[in-house]
Amino acid sequence: MSPELPSPSSPALAAFLRGVERRAAVLAELQCGDAARGDRVLAAAMAEFHATAADEDPSAGQVMAAWPERFWGVLLAHPELRNHVPVRVELSATDRLATLGSGPRAALLLSLAAGLEQDAAASVMGVPTGSYELAVRRALAHLAGSDDQAALAAQWRRLREQIHRRIKSLPPERQRFLAEARAEALAGGAVESGSVELPPPAPIRGRPRWLAPLLWALLALCVIAFLATFLGEALLKRLAGPAEGEVWSGSLADADPASRYGRSFEVLTHRDFELLADPEGMEESRALGFHSWLAAQGVSAAMPGAESGVTRDGRTPPPGTHPVSSGDRAGEPSSRSGETTHEPR
Amino acid sequence: MSRGRRRQWLGAVPVLLLAGAALAVPAGLEEMAQAWEKLDPARRQQLQQRAATWERWDGAAQQAFLARMTEWDALDWKEQAARRVRYHAWQDLPNYDRARVRAAASGYAQLPDEEREALRERYAALDESERRGWLLGPELGADYPALQPLLAQVPAGEHEALLAALRGLDSMQRRDLAVLVQRTAPQDRDQLRRELVSTAAENRGQWLRTRLGR
């Protein structure tokens, strides 16, 4: 129990950690979006896991069988893995993971990176298998921007392929760092060394007690957000008050239009507030891929003033030459399906 | 919860304090007063900025926002996602690329119908990854297929620096870099990317020549 007492590390424990290390590194990296942070967390998790495993009777068969779930639970319990660093432009399929909430992201990664079966993954998250399955489906649908079976399967394959490639090609210096961290964890003390800053090992029995409620809450949030996509419009209509000529008897009927209470909450917490607050930017980005491609094909406005705009600040197109005409919008549709697979949040 | 973990959380306290006025719940968000302090500092800051923007607008601007919001909420996920991606990509474009994109858009609008149609068809025939590449703008978009191996699996935190480095190269240099990328084994591409990003902009040309000469 006491972390001060270095325990002789069992070969089984060493083998387990070595076997799980690369997968864990990739899971932690993708969960928080930062390889260095992920590796630090993993180093700390290995130390914690060792501290708890050292308590147990290694000869009991079921102890070892429980290691994987325990280990992933300890790793995911780290608060540093809860937030993903923001991603501006998505360069690969895994970047899109940033658009998921931390619970659904963990659900996907437990399967794709950790390689756990559904039952085991559900148990790490402390939810029934059905809920886990649902969370994975939702996450995939979210990423694929569609919930048809083929799109989900394609999204799954794409992610799996990228994640596996990442596991296989973990850079050598990260491998060295992790091997060192593992050796320290197994030596029992594992507090600090070199650049590895480890928090004091916290004795944890199984999954931390607060992990399950947290993950449940995240799952619940996803469901609420999902439902809100259906209810949003109805709710907004209500908050916006009756249309002209229409009378509502509800309590909001007497709210004057400038009243902010309730409505402004919905506005300020709108996921896409920044986009909606910048209609010009939205308009200009509407057919971005197509227009970039056109520019590279040499399509350009031959009009006075365009040249100087192009070469210098470029933020002032001549008035009346607003770039996106309705014709342009029609120009993007076939690209839409492609670009769509990008994101969702 | 263990003491160790609590200590970890206490470590976040200075950050919370640094967030300054963070503790005041902005007008309009009173409903979340209870949860306010538990929010991520970055999220709090974002909400504060939004509240300030909202307050700054007059009634007409607020109404216009609400109209856009209603319209947006009626779009399906797919469309929302696509627009979001394009918007962020646009935000990240340097002014020079933006101007080229604008000029292309107006040039296109002036073309006869059949030419526009032909261009649309050609673009639609590109594969998805190539079209995604064009979101990086006319400059990088052209080199995206060749540079793609370098751009895959980039840790999120390094995107900005990498894109800035690529945008700092001229088209010849990017072509050289593409050659280098093709010659580099997958497991060494991380190293190549790191060198590219960490080399000072003015030395990148020299760095490329040296690397190619090896």
Image: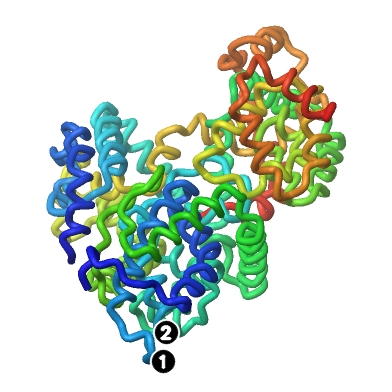
Residue A144: image location, x then y, percent: 59, 62
Residue at 26%, 42% (x, y): give it.
B41
- Seen from the viewer's position, the closer of residues A130 and A72 is A72
Q: Are marks 2 and 1 on the same chain?
A: yes
- The residue that mark 2 highlights is A64
Rounded to the nearest angstrom, the CA distance separating label 2 from label 1 is 6 Å
Quadrant showing the N terminus of chain A: bottom left
- The residue that mark 1 highlights is A61
Q: Amino acid at mark 2?
A: Met
Residue at 47%, 78% (x, y): give it.
A12
Image position of B204 (left or right of A80): right
Image position of A240 (left or right of A327): left
- Seen from the viewer's position, the closer of residues B14 and B119 is B14
Residue A245 appears anywhere in the view: no
- Seen from the viewer's position, the closer of residues A9 and B133 is A9
Residue A56: image location, x then y, percent: 30, 82
Q: Amino acid at mark 1?
A: Gly
Quarter occupied by residue A73: bottom left
